[in-house]
Amino acid sequence: METAEGGCRCGAVRYRVAGAPAATSHCHCGDCRRMTGAPTLAWAIFPEDKVEIVAGSLTVHETSPGVEWGFCARCGSTLTYRRATRPGLFDVTTATLDDPELFPPDKEIWTGERLSWIRSNPAVPHFPKTATG
Ligand SMILES: [Zn+2]
Ligand SMILES: [Zn+2]
């Protein structure tokens, strides 16, 4: 199975993913904004057992119970996300892959929270909230 790697800006935390993501998305939600300082955030969502931390360790911040954001405590890069109400999946931030072109987002989600000065990509489907409603 093909693997890809990614990591934080300072190099302390590195991860490896195997195979193709179960889903991809480009998120406009307010949580992604606050957690990254960026206007949007792209995600590649993998089965939990296909994501491995290969160097360093994630520091986890819970934005609400069971909602875990993983980041590098040294440089602050936001790297991962997982949620107890969606077991078995582990998201990595597409832009922290060594090759962010590998898994381009195939949909935009939470467009209801999109900033007015961010253009949407007309080539992909849009969802006002999550892709499943
Ligand atoms: Zn770092
Ligand atoms: Zn989001």
Image: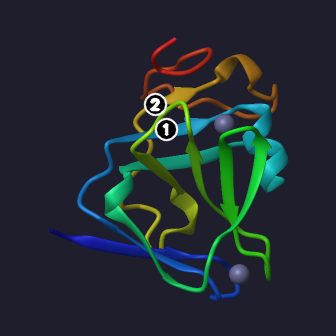
Q: Amino acid at mark 1?
A: Ser
Quadrant in which the N terminus is drawn: bottom left
**Quarter of the rendering containing residue 79:** bottom right
- Residue 83 rendering spot, x and y as whole percentages: 58, 40
- Name which residue lies at 78% across and 76% down: 73
Would you identify the image quadrant in which residue 118 lies?
Answer: top right
Residue sitting nearer the eye, 75 or 121: 75
86 and 77: which one is in front? 86
> Is residue 65 depicted above or below 91 in this figure?
above
Number of numbered tags placed on the structure image: 2
Q: Is residue 39 visible?
A: no
Under circle 1, the secondary element is strand
Disc 2 crowd, CA 10 A, few/some/many (<14, 14-19, 20+): some
Which residue appears at 42% of the width and 28% of the height?
123
Q: Which quarter holds ligand 1?
A: bottom right
Amino acid under label 2?
Answer: Lys
Within 10 Å of disc 1 (Cα), the crowding (few <14, some 14-19, many 20+) is many
Q: Find disc 1 in the rendering and name its residue.
A: 25
Residue furthest to the left: 1
50 and 131: which is toward the camera: 50
Q: Is residue 4 left or right of residue 80?
A: left
Residue at 74% x, 26% y is 114
Mark 2 = which residue?
107
Tag 2, which secondary structure?
loop
User: Based on the displayed image, in which of its 4 quarters is residue 17 positioned?
Assistant: bottom left
Task: Check whether the beta carbons of the residues at disc 1 and disc 2 lie within 8 A of each other.
Answer: yes
